[in-house]
Image: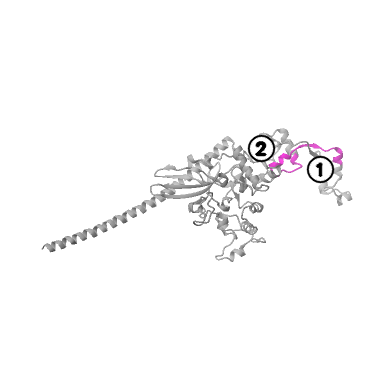
Amino acid sequence: MTQRRGSVLVGLLWCLTLLSVVVIGVLHLARLDLKVTQNYADTIQARYLALAGVEKAKALLYRDMMERQRAVKSHSGELHSLPEQFRDVRLGRGEFSVFRQGRRDEGGGILYGVSDEESRLNVNHASSQELSKILGMTEDVLAAIQDWRDGDNSARPSGAEAEHYASLRPPYLPRNGPFQTMRELLMVRGVTRELLSGEDANQNGLLDPEEDDGRASLPVDDADGVLDSGWSELLTIDSMARNENSAGQARVDIKSADERTLSSVRGISEELAKAIVAYRNQDEFETIADLLDVRAMVPQSPGAVEENSRRPPGGGPQSGARSGTPLPQQQSRQRSSEAQPNLQPTGPPLINEDLLIEIADDITTGSDTEQPGAININTASPEVLACLPGVSRELGQAIVAYRKSAGYFPNIAAVLKVDGMTRDIFKQLAPKICARSETFRILSEGRVPLTGARRRVEMVVRVSSGNVETLSYREDL
């Protein structure tokens, strides 16, 4: 009897043990399920925290633009590094940060703020001469990029068109139009990930630990604490500036505006407006830098006028002149001479560099409402500036050094104050540069510290007086 009772007790103990194991297992699985669910919920929350960071950046960008317009100021630079607004901002159970990787000329490291696309060279609008100055750009790759973005299937001597891409596995066709994304460059013959991304293997624009450890892990890097992002640091597809002054008003076109309109520009008197109109009737303006050549127009001496009337266009004999029958060009010139006296520029220039800097933001040489691909001299790196015509690496560094010491350029003509900048170089630069940005890249990270969940969102936006337009969006960072 005692032995039977002992067996029953042992059986009960085994049952309790098995039941305990089952209960513990069920509780463990339930705990795991709960943690998975919580982590998933926190991941979703981290994503919305990142989006909150994007929305805050958009709101601050819009406010900054409106404040600059009221103050008639081209560039403030405040939102490019503003940790008090963008670093570890608490919201509910989590936090978000808006940040970017500092460039070499900014000292590297993490900067809490936004970056602008006008600081980069627009691959869709840059000339072949500008693209050829990029480090690592070969003649073959340059030709392939030009063939990809042009509108035909005629390959350049060292380029590539449909025939080449159709022979690949898998085959595809060139766009024959503007690039739609920066990653599309990887489809161009000769463009490698190393050229496009440099050390930034995951293309998130940040220096991750594995991208700053030398040869310890891939990708191989120089372990200097500064991210080398390859061409992606220099190029964009989104840059554009409106042809407006810092107050948001349309600029005056000096190629076509009448005297009254020209004199409405602060700094241009009625007498100067008359001189500008008289001068452009003889020499057409190509850029605002041509205003530096404006001189007073005075009638030629009678002897010179008579000699010019007898001389055929071009200075050489012409069949019409020999036959005594005026050529159409001569008839037009004669009618013009009868309508107004023959004028000749004389005396010193009427517009010096200081006056040009005063009026530069209010004038333009064209009716286009936009400047696609314009580069902001207040934010561009020396490497980007050195791609522009006439600008050497040394002059690009001098431009960056000047804006750091003397403050941001109020308009493009102020770059004339930089040591090494000549009027001839400025004439080449004027159509290609601007002094403010309207297109911005926002990289935001949301975090839930309790579980360590985090998500990143990158958005490129364009700010105008009417709205903030989204141009591109990424989450795979």
Real-space Cα distance between discs 1 and 2?
38 Å
Chosen colour scheme:
one colour
47 or 258: nearer the eye? 47
Q: Secondary structure at mark 1?
A: helix
Rendering quarter of residue 426: top right
* Mark 1 crowd level (few <14, some 14–19, many ≥20, 10 Å Cα): few
Q: Which kind of residue does numbered mark 1 sit on?
A: Arg
Mark closest to the chain's N terminus, 1 or 2: 1
Q: Is residue 181 above or below residue 468?
A: below
- Write down the region rendered in magenta: 279-306
Residue found at x 72% / y 39%: 292
Graded by Cα atoms within 10 Å as few (under 14), some (14 to 19) or many (20 or more), the crowding at tag 2 reads some
Looking at the rendered structure, which numbered label has been put on residue 357? Answer: 2
95 w.r.t. 139: above or below: above
Q: Is residue 473 left or right of residue 450?
A: right
Q: Nearer the viewer, residue 232 or 276?
A: 232
For residue 263, side relative to residue 122 (left or right): right
Nearer mark to the viewer, of 1 and 2: 2
Identify residue type, mark 2: Ile
User: Is residue 297 one of those drawn in magenta?
Assistant: yes
Q: Are marks 1 and 2 in contact (CB under 8 Å)?
A: no
Which of 28/428 is in front?
28
User: What residue lies at 80% left-to-right and 39% top-to-bottom?
Assistant: 344
The correct choice, above or below, for 113 with respect to 156 in the image is above
Tell whether position 281 is magenta: yes
389, 181: nearer the viewer: 389
Circle 2 — which element?
helix
